[in-house]
Amino acid sequence: MAPLSEVQLIQSRLSEELRLQSTMRSWETVPDWQLKESPTYKNLPFVVALLGVEEGTARRNAAQTLRNICGVSGFWNDHVCRAGGLTRLLQLLQQETDDEHLLFDVPSESAFYALQTVVWLIRENPANTHSAVSNGAISIMVRMLCANIHNRDCSSLSAEGLEHISKCDSRYTQCIREDGGLRALVAAIDALHTPHHSPFLDSLRDVEGPARVRTSAALTRALMAMVPPPHEFDPDDMPLLLNRDAIVAAGGVSATIRILDEDPTLETVKFSLGVLERLSCEDEDVQNEIRAKGGIQKLVALIRKHSDLSQTQTVVNAVAALHQVGKNNHVNQELIRREGGIKALVHLLDLCEVNQPGLIVCARDALNALCVNNDTNAGAFLDAVADWLDLPDSIANDKSTLDLLQRAAVSRICGAVSGGEMDDNAHNMYDHETMTNLACDNARLVRLSVHDIQQAAARNRDAAGATKHKLEVDLKRKAMGIHDVPDPDEFVCPITLELMHDPVVASDGRSYERRAIERVLKSAKLTGAISPISREPLLDQLFENRNLRSRIAAHNEDLLFAAGMALTKASVDTDSQMCMRL
């Protein structure tokens, strides 16, 4: 090693003095006017210039000095950037990552201090973040994350830096993806939680204790920042959709599900739940993959295990993830019910009535999403609240949830009155009277009036009568060989394309078969129904079209009468011909 020159010795000595001064001062309590009188402030341009010298000690001291003063107040962050410190720090890191030997060895102290300072400078500072990105911060942090670095703190800092950049401007996530940052984050998570077969970051395999927890939390939090939350989801935002696809393709679903086996008190579990929620939003393929990887069982088990609200935020995140995993996915909804997810969510509503408003809303929204288009789940929801003496305000004051339970109660009453089975097979052991009494009890619980119950029973009888009448007409037309005769278009339901037997008028002014349009209104209860013909919004109101029903009945009678007359005439003609032959 060559001896240091006189200039280098002076640089090293001065940098050491400045480093010691920056370490000894408590910068948080010092007013700005005193900071401007400090030796550190007066020599700040000199400290920044030392970041570019070749002598390692001076460069390390300069980087550590900036590390000591940055992050404690906006004063130092602003003046360091004005002195060109951010650019110099990134240049130092660029030299570090360009050196292949350093990439596969422990990074220098200078690089570590520089990375830590850059992360502090860009934290919640858009101007500094834009400047850092323009100077190559993304590629630098991705390379330091991808490299097989033994210093796990560098992985945490790189992930934190990428997180701050993505939060500053969502467009930067596209650059992170193109530079391989998403793959690197997933691989780093995989390296921490699958110690026997990870492609790289081998050094992280043996990390244990607080350092491992801290690193895992930073990685999962950064990964969560790369995908928007459900309320910001835009199906037309192609870059964000590509980010999600890249995370899934890199094995992000498996990696995050594996974290759910960790201690639920850890921050990394909460962040991994957030990742699953965002990845599964409006994506059936991801929802199915989560089911295939056993994610639904783990989510439900997590909610049931901590239903005592000992880990409130973890439970909230698990409920939100379960909501997105089961939304508009009938197979997942069935599995959630079989695993006890409906009962677990209802149990949360019963527990957190007073002091957990956020959890109440989250659990209620999840129940609505899992039950609104699933009669079996709605019945399970009704059964879960059947033991309550009265509905809590969290349900009674929410119209959509109360409507959901009331529809389930109406269906239960109609099934009991008609002698059919109840939604839950466990009730099949009951006789007709017991089923009717239970159905009435459920109706009273969900605040259905006697008038509502009578109307529901009447609609059920009308529907049964219409079905019976349809079968009779079809049989008669088949018997007379006229079942293929086309009906007038105005008598045909535009949804089923079959002859209407119980026509009703919707708010768009058109007539439909009652059961067909009721399915349309029910399937879009939360998002708002749309007319199948004009695509205009539909109101939840139907009016019986008695005039059209009479005309259809008259049409059927005329058709059957004409067919009967034709058959009679054909029979008479046949008899006459036989007589003439004789």
Image: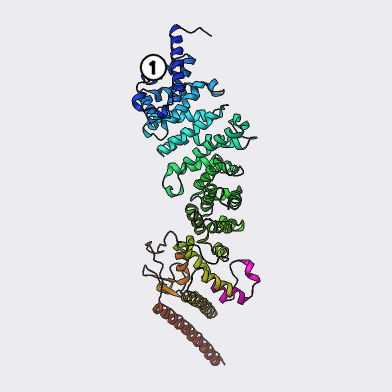
Residue 383: say if magenta. no
Percent x, y of residue 250: 55, 39
Q: Does residue 431 sit above or below 219 in this rendering?
A: below
Give the position of the C terminus as an image quadrant.
bottom right
Element under disc 1: helix
Q: Nearer the viewer, residue 566 or 527?
A: 527
Instruction: Give the quadrant of residue 191.
Output: top right
Q: Does residue 16 sit above or below 546 in this rendering?
A: above
Percent x, y of residue 575: 54, 90
Residue 429: say if magenta. yes
Is residue 292 visible in the rendered image? The answer is: yes
Percent x, y of residue 170: 41, 39
The region drawn magenta spans: 410-436
Give the position of the N terminus as an image quadrant.
top right
Secondary structure that dominates the magenta span: helix
Across the whole image, how many numbered discs are drawn on residues?
A: 1
Residue type of the residue flagged with mark 1: Phe
Q: Residues within 10 Å of mark 1 (few under 14, many from 20)?
A: some
Check disc 1 and report the residue beneath it: 46
